C-alpha cells in the first residue's frame, strides 16, 4: 500500500513576487566544440536566458502582474489601434526553492495570463509555447524539479504580434501559481456545480467532480461534497465510496438538495461553497473549495430576460481590460474598483470585450453582483483555439456571475456557411462542458445568414433601426443588444477639438455606425423583447482612438475615462438605470473667453420637473421626459448656475455649478478609508485641484508630484486625458480638467501609508491611510544569488576522512591545486576509495535576517557522502547524490569572514561537484 501520509493536502503558492525581467530579446551564441554541443542538446540543457545557470543578477527585479508595453514611450510611427506604444519581446526569470519533503507530490506551474506567445522553461527543460494572450495555461513540472534545491522558471514573452485591434499590452500580466497536490487529487477545474430550481423553496444541486490518480495503485476513497452557506454553516452533504483508478481516475456525479436557497442576483449576490474532499484510510488526500451561486436564467422572445423568475433588463457595458497607470496588469483591488464604479452607475451586466477576462474580475463580479457575458476571442474550432475555448468554459463555469457565453465578435465569417459550421462545432464544445447557459455571438451583420439560427440569443451589434424588423421575422428568437451606442466624448471637454484630439462630453458625438447614448438606450428601453443593452464602452481604453489618430492615444467611447472618473453621460445612465434621485448639471461654468455667448446647459435627471437658475434668476422649468435629457441655452455670465429638481411638486434635489477662482490647493481622496497590509491591496486615490474656497477647478492642468512611505509603492498614475503622452509608470502626473489618479500598493507592514502631493504654486497636501494587519496569501519569493564562490583549492585524493580544520598551507603551491568553479565546472576523481576536499575563504554578503535566510548551495555534489564545515564546524552531512546540498549560514553576520571546507567520499566511483557553488538569499 502506498503511504498516503507522505504528502500533505493541496497547496497553492502565489509566485508573483520577485521576478527578474529584461526587455528586448536575448539570444545565446551557438555552442562551440563537442562538449558544449553535447551538453546543450541534452534534456535540461537550454542555454542563454532559458538556461539553469544564466546570470540574471543585473536584470530588473519586479513583482507580477506586469505590463512592459505600458512602460514604453508613445511614438506616432507605432500602431494607433494599440495606443502608439511599441510591442516588444521580454524575458522573465524566477529562482525558487522547493523543499526535499515535496518529493512525491504533484507540482504544476499555473499562468493565469501572459500576453503573448509565452515560451516557458523550467530548469532548462522546455515546457511549451502558449500562443493566446487571454486564457491561462499550466504545465506539470513534477519530474523536473530540484527537490531540496533551487529551481528556475524562464519565460520568453513575444508581444510584437496582435490578437485584437485595441491596446493589448505585453508581459506576465496576471497571477502565477505553484500548485502542489497528492498524486490522487481533484483534476484542474475538475468540480462543476449546477443547480435546478423546481420551486423557489428548493434547489437540486448536481456536483460533478473529476479525480486524477498519478500514484502507484488504485485508491478506494471516501469522496465527500459539503455545501456551506455564506456563514460557513453546512447546509447539504453527499458522500460516496469510489475507486480512483491509477489509469483513468474517476468521474463522480453527486446530487444534493438545498432547502430554502438564497438566490444570487446583482442586487443580492449570495454565494455558497462546496468543499470537495478525498479521504483514503483516514488520510486526507485532497480538498478543494468551489464557490457557486443558485439562480435561474430564462429568456423569452417577447418579454426578454428573466432572472429568478422576474423580468430583468440588462443594463450592461462592454469593456477591455486595461486601466490607467498599469495597462493590462490590473491588480485585483482595481478590478473590484472598476466593477464598483459600474454598479454605482446602475450597471448590472458586463461584457468581456473581446476575450476571456482575468479570474479576479469574475470573482469581483460574483461578490459584488454583476452579470457577465463571458466572451471567447475567435470564431475558430480547430487546434489551439478549440483548446482555449475548452479552457475558458472549464475555468469560468462555476461563476454565478457568468450568465451567457459569447463565442465571437464581428467576425468576417458571421454570415457564411463556413462560419455556421465553425460555430456549430464550438457550440457543441460548450454544450458538452456546460449545458446550463445560453450561447450567443455578437453580430454586426449577417443577421439573416446561417449563423444566427444557431445562437440561443441573437446578439445584435448596433443597427437599432432593424430590431423590429428582425423580431417580426424571427418572433421566437430572443434578442440582446450585444454592442450599442459608440458614443464619443472626453471628460470635461465641451467643444470638439480635432487638433488636440478631444470630443465634446455632451451627448452629441457618435461614430458612423453608432448612436448617441439616449438614442441607443431608448431603443432598448422601449422594446420589451430586447433583453437589454451592452454599451460600447463602460471605460475608455488605450488604442482605437476613434475618430482621431495622433496625438490621441486612447478611445473616447467610455462612459467613464481610463481612471474611472465619470463623464457626464454617466449621470444620464444613472438617472434611468436605478431608482435613487439623480440631478446632474453640465457643463462647468468657467468660460471667460465666451462672455455673453450662449452656452448649452444640460440636465440629466429622473425627477419630474427641473428649474434652472443663473445667479438667482430663474431661467424656466422643464418637465422631464423618460430616457431623455433637459437643455437650456444660457448666455454666459460668471457666477452661480443652479438646478432644482421636483417630484410631486416638492423639491427633492438641487445642484450647483459655480465659476471658480484660480487653483490653490490639492486634495487627495482615497477610495477606501483603510487598506489591508497583505502586499497586494491598492489605494485608488483621486487627486483633485481646488480653488481657495474648496471648489474643483475644471480647467486645472497642474503637474502634481507624489511621494509615498517606504513600505508602499506607487504602481501607476493617470488622468483620463485621451491625448496625454505622459508616462503611466511615474511619480508625477498633470491633472486633466482638475483630476488625476494615483495607485498606491501597500506592503506587508501594518501602519500608516502616507502619500504626499506637491505642485508649483499650490499648497502641498498629505494623506495618511491606515494599513491594517491582514492574512497574506501563501506566496513563494525568489532565491537571490548573493555571491558565487568561484576560487577554490582542491586537495589530492585522501585515504582518510579529513578533519574539519583541514586547509592548505599558505605557501602550498603543489599538493592543493587551484580551481576556478564555473557554471559548467566538473571535478571528479576515479582512482579508488578516498576523499577529496575543497577549501576557500569568503565574506558573508549583506542580507535581511528578518525576511531572508542565507544559504550555501552546492548544486550537485557527487559522492557517497558530502560533509560541509564552516570555520571548522560540521554544518551539513549530505548523502543524496544528484540533489543540491544546502547549508544554512544564518549565524553569520554581513561582512564576516569565514572558511568553507567541503569533503566528499567515494568508493570505486566518480566523486566531486557538478555546477556552481553559491551563497543564496532565500525568502523566509
Image (cartoon, rainbow, N blue to C red):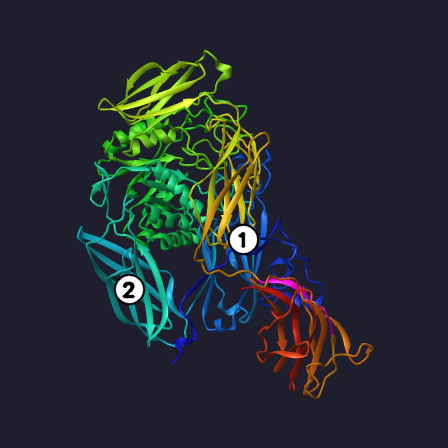
Q: Secondary structure at mark 2?
A: strand
**Image spot of residue 401 (x, y percent):** 32, 47
Residue range in magenta is 783-792
**Image spot of residue 362 (x, y percent):** 37, 49
Q: Quadrant of the N terminus?
A: bottom left
Q: Is residue 319 left or right of residue 885?
A: left
Nearer the observer, 445 or 569: 569
Nearer the observer, 405 or 887: 887
Q: Is residue 91 left or right of residue 495?
A: right
Mark 2: few/some/many CA within 10 Å (<14, 14-19, 20+): many
Q: Is residue 833 left or right of residue 444?
A: right
Residue at the disc numbered 1: 63
Q: Closer to the camera: disc 2 or disc 1? A: 1
For residue 586, say whether it is visible: no
Q: Quadrant of residue 475?
A: top left
Q: Which mark is residue 225?
A: 2
- In the displayed structure, would residue 386 be above or below residue 286? above
Amino acid at each position: 500500500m502506498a503511504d498516503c501520509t507522505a504528502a500533505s493536502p493541496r497547496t497553492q503558492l502565489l509566485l508573483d513576487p520577485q521576478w527578474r525581467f529584461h526587455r528586448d530579446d536575448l539570444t545565446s551564441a551557438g555552442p562551440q566544440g563537442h562538449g558544449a554541443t553535447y551538453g546543450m542538446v541534452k534534456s535540461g540543457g537550454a542555454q542563454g536566458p532559458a538556461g539553469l545557470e544564466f546570470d540574471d543578477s543585473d536584470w530588473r527585479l519586479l513583482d507580477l502582474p506586469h505590463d512592459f508595453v505600458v512602460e514604453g514611450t508613445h511614438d506616432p510611427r507605432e500602431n494607433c489601434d494599440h495606443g502608439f506604444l511599441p510591442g516588444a519581446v521580454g524575458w522573465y526569470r524566477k529562482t525558487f526553492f522547493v523543499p526535499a519533503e515535496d518529493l512525491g507530490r504533484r507540482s504544476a506551474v499555473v499562468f493565469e495570463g501572459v500576453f503573448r506567445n509565452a515560451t516557458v522553461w523550467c530548469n532548462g527543460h522546455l515546457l511549451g509555447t502558449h500562443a493566446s494572450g487571454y486564457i491561462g495555461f499550466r504545465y506539470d513540472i513534477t519530474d523536473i524539479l530540484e527537490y531540496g534545491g533551487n529551481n528556475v522558471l524562464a519565460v520568453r514573452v513575444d508581444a510584437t504580434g496582435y490578437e485584437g485591434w485595441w491596446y493589448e499590452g505585453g508581459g506576465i500580466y496576471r497571477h502565477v501559481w505553484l500548485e502542489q497536490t497528492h498524486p490522487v487529487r481533484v483534476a484542474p477545474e475538475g468540480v462543476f456545480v449546477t443547480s435546478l430550481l423546481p420551486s423557489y423553496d428548493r434547489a437540486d444541486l448536481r456536483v460533478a467532480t473529476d479525480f486524477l490518480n498519478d500514484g502507484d495503485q488504485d485508491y478506494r476513497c471516501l469522496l465527500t461534497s459539503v455545501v456551506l452557506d455564506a456563514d460557513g454553516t453546512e447546509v447539504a452533504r453527499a458522500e460516496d465510496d469510489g475507486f480512483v483508478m491509477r489509469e483513468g481516475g474517476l468521474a463522480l456525479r453527486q446530487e444534493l438538495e438545498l432547502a430554502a436557497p438564497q438566490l444570487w442576483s446583482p442586487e443580492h449576490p449570495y454565494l455558497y461553497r462546496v468543499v470537495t474532499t478525498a479521504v483514503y484510510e483516514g488520510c486526507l488526500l485532497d480538498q478543494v473549495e468551489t464557490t457557486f451561486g443558485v439562480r435561474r436564467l430564462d429568456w423569452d422572445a417577447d418579454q426578454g430576460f428573466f432572472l429568478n423568475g422576474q423580468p430583468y433588463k440588462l443594463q450592461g457595458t462592454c469593456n477591455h481590460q486595461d486601466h490607467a497607470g498599469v495597462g493590462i496588469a490590473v491588480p485585483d483591488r482595481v478590478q473590484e474598483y472598476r466593477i464598483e464604479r459600474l454598479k454605482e452607475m446602475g450597471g448590472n451586466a458586463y461584457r468581456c470585450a473581446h476575450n476571456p477576462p482575468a479570474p479576479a474580475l469574475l470573482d469581483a463580479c460574483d461578490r459584488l453582483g454583476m452579470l457577465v457575458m463571458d466572451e471567447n476571442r475567435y470564431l475558430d474550432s480547430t487546434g489551439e483555439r478549440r483548446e482555449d475555448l475548452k479552457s475558458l468554459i472549464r475555468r469560468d463555469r462555476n461563476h454565478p456571475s457568468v450568465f451567457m457565453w459569447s463565442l465571437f465578435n464581428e467576425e468576417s465569417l458571421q454570415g457564411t456557411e463556413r462560419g455556421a459550421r465553425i460555430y456549430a462545432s464550438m457550440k457543441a464544445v460548450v454544450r458538452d462542458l456546460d449545458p446550463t447557459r445560453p450561447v450567443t455571438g455578437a453580430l454586426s451583420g449577417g443577421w439573416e445568414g446561417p449563423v444566427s439560427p444557431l445562437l440561443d440569443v441573437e446578439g445584435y451589434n448596433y443597427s437599432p433601426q432593424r430590431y423590429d424588423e428582425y423580431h417580426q421575422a424571427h418572433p421566437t428568437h430572443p434578442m440582446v443588444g450585444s454592442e450599442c451606442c459608440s458614443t464619443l466624448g472626453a471628460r470635461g471637454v465641451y467643444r470638439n477639438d480635432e487638433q488636440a484630439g478631444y470630443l465634446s462630453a455632451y451627448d452629441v458625438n457618435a461614430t458612423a455606425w453608432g448612436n448617441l447614448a439616449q438614442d441607443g438606450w431608448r431603443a432598448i428601453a422601449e422594446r420589451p423583447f430586447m433583453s437589454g443593452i451592452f454599451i460600447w464602452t463602460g471605460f475608455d481604453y488605450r488604442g482605437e482612438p476613434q475618430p482621431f489618430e495622433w496625438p490621441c492615444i486612447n478611445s473616447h467611447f467610455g462612459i467613464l475615462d481610463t481612471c474611472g472618473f465619470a463623464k457626464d453621460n454617466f449621470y444620464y445612465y444613472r438617472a434611468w438605470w436605478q431608482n435613487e434621485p439623480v440631478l446632474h448639471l453640465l457643463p462647468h461654468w468657467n468660460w471667460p473667453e465666451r462672455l455673453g455667448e450662449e452656452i448649452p446647459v444640460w440636465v440629466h435627471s429622473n425627477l419630474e420637473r427641473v428649474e434652472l437658475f443663473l445667479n438667482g434668476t430663474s431661467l424656466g422649468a422643464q418637465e422631464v421626459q423618460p430616457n431623455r435629457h433637459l437643455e437650456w441655452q444660457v448666455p454666459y455670465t460668471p457666477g452661480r448656475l443652479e438646478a432644482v429638481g421636483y417630484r410631486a411638486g416638492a423639491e427633492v434635489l438641487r445642484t450647483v455649478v459655480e465659476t471658480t477662482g484660480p487653483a490653490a490647493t490639492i486634495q487627495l481622496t482615497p477610495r477606501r478609508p483603510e487598506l489591508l497590509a497583505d502586499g497586494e491591496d491598492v489605494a485608488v486615490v483621486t487627486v483633485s485641484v481646488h480653488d481657495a474656497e474648496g471648489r474643483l477647478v475644471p480647467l486645472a492642468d497642474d503637474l502634481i508630484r507624489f511621494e509615498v512611505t517606504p513600505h508602499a509603492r506607487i504602481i501607476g498614475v493617470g488622468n483620463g486625458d485621451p491625448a496625454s503622452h505622459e508616462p503611466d509608470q511615474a511619480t508625477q502626473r498633470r491633472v486633466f480638467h482638475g483630476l488625476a489618479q494615483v495607485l498606491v500598493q501597500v506592503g506587508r507592514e501594518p501602519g500608516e501609508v502616507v502619500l504626499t502631493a506637491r505642485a508649483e504654486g499650490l499648497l502641498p497636501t498629505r494623506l495618511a491611510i491606515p494599513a491594517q494587519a491582514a492574512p497574506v496569501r501563501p506566496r513563494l519569493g525568489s532565491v537571490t544569488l548573493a555571491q558565487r564562490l568561484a576560487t577554490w583549492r582542491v586537495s589530492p585524493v585522501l585515504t582518510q576522512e579529513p578533519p574539519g580544520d583541514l586547509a592548505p598551507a599558505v605557501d602550498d603551491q603543489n599538493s592543493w591545486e587551484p580551481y576556478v568553479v564555473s557554471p559548467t565546472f566538473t571535478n571528479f576523481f576515479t582512482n579508488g576509495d578516498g576523499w577529496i576536499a575543497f577549501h576557500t575563504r569568503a565574506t558573508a554578503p549583506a542580507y535581511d535576517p528578518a525576511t531572508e535566510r542565507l544559504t550555501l548551495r552546492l548544486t550537485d555534489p557527487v559522492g557517497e557522502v558530502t560533509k560541509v564545515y564552516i570555520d571548522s564546524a560540521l554544518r551539513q552531512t549530505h548523502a543524496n547524490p544528484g540533489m543540491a546540498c544546502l547549508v544554512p549560514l544564518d549565524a553569520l553576520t554581513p561582512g564576516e569572514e569565514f572558511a568553507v571546507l567541503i569533503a566528499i567520499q567515494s568508493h570505486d566511483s566518480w566523486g566531486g561537484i557538478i555546477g556552481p557553488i553559491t551563497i543564496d538569499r532565500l525568502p523566509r
